[in-house]
Image (tube, helix red, strand yellow):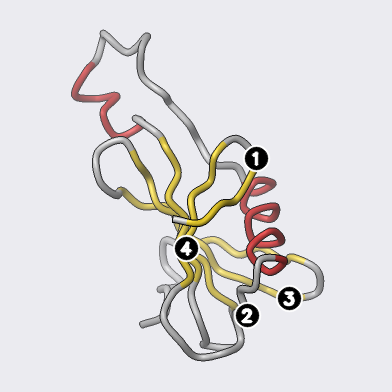
Amino acid sequence: MTLRNKGSRKIVVGNDPYRWVISTASKGYIVLMAEHKQEKGRKLRIYIESDINDYWVEYPYTDSLNLKVVTPKEVATIISQAIEQGWNPKEKGPPMIFDWSGDVLGGR
């Protein structure tokens, strides 16, 4: 299943175009999904610690929440690191899954 154009964002890393989207995951996490825009191959799934979805539930008691927001610059870094760690977005297969902690991509 490919990412829909509506709701996803475009980014170019190296010379390759990608689409990416952030969505909710389990409590305390958001998930970044990315794929090559032209080659429908293996997806990238990155779990990122964030309480951003709890903000509205916990308001106004949000001081202790991790309100992590993912920027396009971080997405480019994540994609680059995933490629370095063996993600080939042009080959078929199941999604590669990682955790993003600080500025380091690690296995899940």
First reached walking from the N terminus: tag 4 or tag 1: 4
| Residue that label 1 marks | 103
Q: Are marks 4 and 1 in contact (CB under 8 Å)?
A: no
Q: Work out whether 4 lies above or below 78.
A: below
Q: Of tags 3 and 2, which is closer to the observer?
A: 2
First reached walking from the N terminus: tag 2 or tag 4: 4
Distance between the alpha carbons at the discs numbered 2 and 4: 20 Å
First reached walking from the N terminus: tag 3 or tag 1: 3
Which element carries disc 3, helix, strand or loop? strand
User: Percent from the top left, x then y, of residue 76?
Assistant: 68, 55
**What's the residue type where badge 1 is placed?**
Asp
Quarter residue 18 falls in: bottom right
Which element carries disc 4, helix, strand or loop? loop
Q: Residue at x 36, y 19 (%)?
A: 65
Q: Of tags 4 and 1, which is closer to the observer?
A: 1
- Label 1: how many Cα within 10 Å (few below 14, some 14–19, many 20+): few
Q: Of tags 4 and 3, which is closer to the observer?
A: 3
| Residue that label 2 marks | 88
Q: Are marks 4 and 3 in contact (CB under 8 Å)?
A: no
| Residue that label 3 marks | 16
Q: Residue furthest left?
A: 57
Residue 104 horizontal side relative to residue 64, left or right: right
**What's the residue type where badge 4 is placed?**
Ser
Mark drawn on residue 8: 4
**What's the residue type where badge 2 is placed?**
Asn
